[in-house]
Image (cartoon, rainbow, N blue to C red):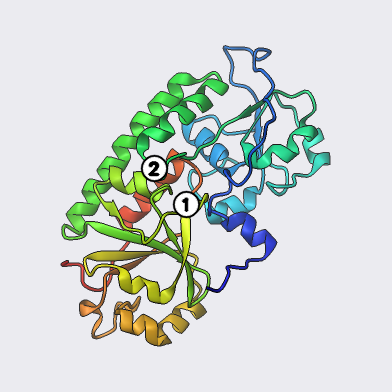
Amino acid sequence: MKAFTFPIGLCAALCSGLLLSSCQSSDATPTPLSSLNSQTSPKVMTPDWGIAATLTAMGYPPVAMGDKPVYREWVGKPLIPDTTLDVGTRYQPNPEMFSQLDLDLVIDNAFYAHLRPMYGDLPIHSIELTSPNKIAKWEDFIEPTLELGRSINKPQAAKDYLDTSKKQIIQAGQTFHARYPHIKKLAVVQFADTNNLRMFSYNSLFQPALETMGLQLVALAEGNEWGFTPIMLGDLAQLDDDTCLVVVEPLSDLLKLELEDSLVWQRLGYSFDQEHPSNKKGRCVTLLPATWNNSGVASMNVLADRLMNVTFVGNTDL
């Protein structure tokens, strides 16, 4: 099987695992938070997109974060306010910029443990917004989200965010079923090129999000530590006819054209061309706007909202 190779900068944005937060582990013990005022929300810096997204969604965006401009492209929602400063790349923030920040707390995860010497005496709270299970479920993300709320002295904000999020995802599922009453099963992939894909598996955030929406995720194998398994284009032939294919963008115009010309893609029966005369009889497929798979409940919210609004082409009367 051809290995996936991405430029280093793009890999940092794509490792979704698309899923970077669990790529490393550390024995470092975070500094206690007892020095923080329990009545105020601390000024937080985080190198991690998932933590930044969740804090922002809870109403308490970080003072600074890593790769803010790239966040807009790969994560998008929730929108990070202009007041949040960009300290450079997530994996290697700019030390000079960091030294000029007025901070109370750094919140990170194990992937960023190598940065901790740069923080000096600042308290550090490490939180993993991932599931440790082979089959992820909504409950896996409750405690990490509550812990994040406690870390900024806003436990009720975290509880409210969880309650609101679950209701929104359930509602998104109801809207989806009203639009596509016959679609029950979805397989989620992302293309590296015309022959190499990653398929998101049951330990990814797609599993609890789809389950909460009343849908079933279909995967061909267990996911790696980042929640996906590499597959070849022809492996999609293993999907049942009643499984719709969700292709996560980005998918360049050139790659779309190459796929449409691919004999394998044609034999599989997929087409993104809504005007194609035989498309009504083709396999059910849709393009999903780029959705970061590493932000806990924040990612699930975005996924549900985007999936609720996409248009499937091909045979949706499964």
Find residue 317 and report its horizontal and vertical position in percent. Answer: 16, 67
Q: Is residue 267 above or below residue 178?
A: below
Q: Are marks 2 and 1 in contact (CB under 8 Å)?
A: yes
Q: CA distance from mark 2 to mark 1?
A: 10 Å
Amino acid type at image mark 2: Ala
The kind of secondary structure element at disc 2 is loop
The quadrant holding residue 240 is bottom left
State left or right for residue 173 relative to residue 152: left
Residue 132, given in percent of the width and then of the height, sits at 47, 39
Q: Is residue 268 visible?
A: yes
* Label 2 or label 1, whichever comes before in sequence order: 2
Q: Position of residue 258 (x, y in %)?
A: 47, 83
- The residue identified by callout 1 is 227
The residue positioned 54% from the left and 18% from the top of the image is 153
Asked which secondary structure carries label 1, the reply is loop
Going by the numbered disc 1, the residue's amino acid type is Gly
Q: Using the rendered image of the protein, determine whether residue 100 is visible from the camera's viewpoint.
A: no
Q: Which numbered disc covers residue 72?
A: none
Q: Quadrant of residue 47?
A: top right
278 with respect to 92 (left or right)? left
Question: What residue sits 69% from the left and 61% below the top?
Answer: 8
Residue identifier under label 2: 136
Judge by depth and name the residue closer to the eye, 223 or 144. 223
Determine crowd level at label 2: few under 14, some 14-19, many 20+ residues with C-alpha closer than 10 A.
many
Residue appearing at x 21%, y 60% in the figure: 183
Q: Is residue 6 above or below residue 172?
A: below
